[in-house]
Image (cartoon, rainbow, N blue to C red):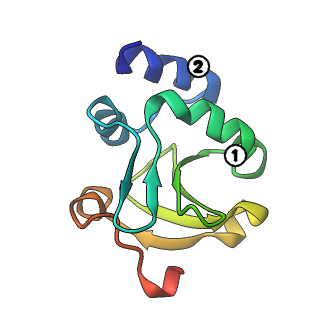
Amino acid sequence: MEATKKIAELEVWLGLRLPEMYAQFLRGHSEKIFGDRVLLYSVEDLIERNSVYETKVYCPGHIAIGDDSGGRAFVIPLEEWMGSVFVVDHGDMTKDGFNLVTTNFDDWIKNDCAVPVYAL
């Protein structure tokens, strides 16, 4: 199924629109590992992953966009997103558990999704 249709399905499931910058990323992105540990999900996998991690329950207004293959999710806010990405433990998926990874999503992607030491 084409990405635009899957994005529309995801937005219905979320009850919110995706930030346009992230939707553009999804249109040209397949699931991929960046660097040595960051897996960013494809649009086809976002509903399943966010259902499993109960993101809508524990992180309302956010979406898990990937993980570190070690028990932590990378999340972004869905409203008023300015490019920030946070990392949070799957066992503590609340805003109190968020650690800032970047304030610039595009630069983060260009830099192979490097995770700063303080966010580890």
Q: Residue at x 23, y 63 (%)?
A: 107
Residue 12 circle label: 2
Frontmost residue, 106 versus 66: 66
Left or right side of 22 for 68: right
**SS for callout 1:** helix
User: Any mark on residue 105, and which?
Assistant: none
Q: Is residue 55 above or below residue 69?
A: above
Is 87 situated left or right of 39 in this image? Answer: right
Residue 93 placement: quadrant = bottom right
Q: Position of residue 54 (x, y in %)?
A: 75, 43
Taking the spot 28% from the left edge, 58% from the top edge, the residue there is 109
User: Toward the viewer: 34 or 94?
Assistant: 34
- For the C terminus, the quadrant is bottom right
Residue shown at 51%/80% (left/top)? 119
Residue contact between numbered discs 2 and 1, judged by CB atoms under 8 Å: no
Disc nearer the start of the sequence (2/1)? 2
Foreground tag (2 vs 1): 1
Quarter of the image containing the N terminus?
Answer: top left
Q: Secondary structure at mark 2?
A: helix
- Residue 87 location in percent, x, y? 55, 66
Instruction: Pick out the residue farthest to the bottom.
Output: 118
Residue depicted at 44% across the width and 23% down the height: 7
Which labelled disc corresponds to residue 55? 1
Place of residue 60 in the rendered image (x, y in percent of width and height, measured from the top left) = 69, 46
7 or 79: nearer the viewer: 7
